[in-house]
Image (spheres, grey):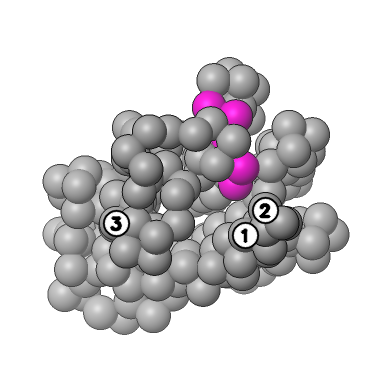
Amino acid sequence: MLFLGTAGIAHAAQRILVVGDSLSAAYGIAERRGWVALLGERLRAERLDYPVVNASISGDTTAGGRARLPKLLAEHRPAIVIVELGGNDGLRGLPVAAMKKNLEAMIAAVQAAGASVLLVGARMPPNYGEDYTRAFETAFAELAQAHRLAFVPELTAGIGARLDHFQPDRIHPNEAAQPLLLNNVWKALAPVLKAKQRTKSP
């Protein structure tokens, strides 16, 4: 789904591509109410001409994102790619090392295409075991540090204990939570946008 920026015409070199899972695909709510759509609105309000392409798929894993990323990069030629994947790897108990390898390949592909990466981390419930949950959470931080990425440690930070911000499955944030998710992303994204604005200035 493409949300056009302030100019009304999508300039390929300025697109923001979101590659995520159900948390970014607005699962269970109207797409226009999801945090990615709200990001498009925020950019327009800030008069920043960055059309947003939401390539998120509910249920996707890092392996799925890695497989489809080359086509997405070639088609949309984004300036910034927000990678929000890994949650489904964790929920399926997939090896953290494999997840990390997939994310590292995605980061390398995005950077090779000349775009910036914003990595969004995730956390697992404690019932997955202390060793697994610690390794899972640490993997994102290690990647962000190693590659000097803009980083959101957890998309749902600040709403975890608020059941009124989740759908009945207690996994997917509801419509009321979407502005909070956007705020978590915006804190890391805003400095990237400012840096790009400086490089574009004469």
User: Mark 3 near mark 1, Cβ–Cβ under 8 Å?
Assistant: no
* 3 vs 1, front mark: 1
Q: Residue at label 1?
A: 197
Q: 159 or 202: which is nearer to us?
A: 202
What span is in magenta? 76-80
Q: Residue 66 location in percent, x, y?
A: 63, 30
Q: Is residue 90 above or below residue 13?
A: below
Q: Residue 115 location in percent, x, y?
A: 69, 42
Dividing the picture into quadrants, the one containing residue 109 is top right
Dividing the picture into quadrants, the one containing residue 171 is bottom left
Q: Residue at label 2?
A: 200
Secondary element at tag 3: helix
Residue lying at 33% horizontally and 32% vertically, measured from the top left: 1
Q: Residue 103 location in percent, x, y?
A: 68, 43
Q: Is residue 78 visible?
A: yes
User: Mark 3 near mark 2, Cβ–Cβ under 8 Å?
Assistant: no
Secondary element at tag 1: helix
Q: Is residue 62 above or below residue 160?
A: above
Most extreme residue toward the front, as rendered?
202
| Position of residue 155 in the picture relative to residue 89 (left or right) | left
**On the rendered image, what quadrant is the C terminus found in?**
bottom right
